[in-house]
Image: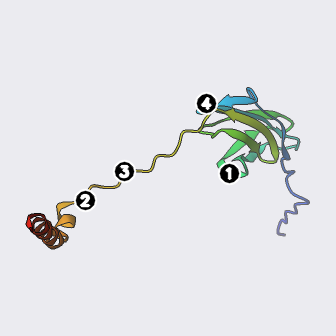
């Protein structure tokens, strides 16, 4: 007689949530590194990996997976650099905090255009020759 295995329900799933989010201070200077901390909690009855999204002003800047035992929490910390002056919302998943960055954001300097090559200049030689001849002609004309 064949043996039949019947599974009722499934393995209980971990239940993750962020209980607290913070930075070391609320105001920073331009160029200063911000460390964003949070507690990732698992209120479920099995351990697992929590999906983490770190956002700055609504834009995801990092994703991660954090292992958390059932009934425990795990502290996480993420470094955020190069924030311009102003107020910024920093989030881990759905939990957010705000920091202010003081100072002047350095201007973006556009790259220097490339120096033209000799090949680029050669195509203008006839025009340069005509302009030179005309300049000499008009300069020596009485």
Residues at badges 4 and 2 in contact (C-beta under 8 Å)? no
SS class, disc 3: loop
Q: Which residue is mark 4?
A: 32
Which residue is at the far top? Answer: 24
Q: Earlier in the sequence, mark 4 or mark 2?
A: 4
Instruction: Tell me the crowding category of disc 3: few under 14, some 14 to 19, or many 20 or more residues within 10 angstroms, Cα based.
Output: few
Q: Are marks 2 and 3 in contact (CB under 8 Å)?
A: no
- How far apart are labels 3 and 4 at the CA level? 28 Å
The percent coordinates of residue 80 (x first, y second) are 64, 38
Q: What is the residue that sits farthest to the right in this orientation?
A: 8
Quarter of the N terminus within the rendering: bottom right
Q: Which residue is mark 1?
A: 60
Q: Earlier in the sequence, mark 1 or mark 3?
A: 1
For marks 3 and 4 on the same chain, the one whose residue lies earlier in the sequence: 4
Q: Going 61% across and 30% down the picture, which residue do you hit? A: 32
Q: In this rendered view, identify the residue nearer to me: 79 or 39.
A: 79
Asked if the residue at tag 1 contacts the one at tag 4, i.e. Cβ–Cβ closer than 8 Å, the answer is no
Mark 2 or 1, closer to the camera = 2
Give left or right: position of 87 versus 103.
right
Q: Which mark is residue 116?
A: 2
The reply to whether the C-beta atoms of the residues labelled 1 and 3 are less than 8 Å apart is: no
Residue 100 % position (x, y): 73, 35
Residue at the disc numbered 3: 112
Q: Quadrant of residue 116?
A: bottom left
């Amino acid at each position: 007689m064949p043996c039949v295995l019947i599974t009722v329900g499934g393995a209980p799933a971990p239940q993750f949530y962020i209980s607290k989010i913070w930075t070391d201070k609320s105001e920073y200077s331009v160029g200063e590194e911000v460390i964003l901390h949070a507690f990732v909690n698992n209120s479920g009855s099995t351990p697992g990996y929590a999906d983490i999204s770190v956002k700055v002003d609504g834009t995801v800047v990092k994703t991660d997976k954090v292992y958390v035992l059932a009934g425990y929490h795990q502290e996480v910390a993420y470094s955020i650099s190069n924030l311009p002056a102003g107020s910024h919302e920093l989030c881990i998943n759905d939990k957010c905090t705000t920091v202010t960055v003081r100072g002047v954001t350095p201007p973006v300097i556009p790259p220097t255009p490339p120096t033209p090559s000799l090949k680029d200049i050669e195509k203008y030689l006839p025009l340069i020759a005509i302009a030179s001849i005309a300049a000499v002609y008009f300069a020596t004309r009485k």
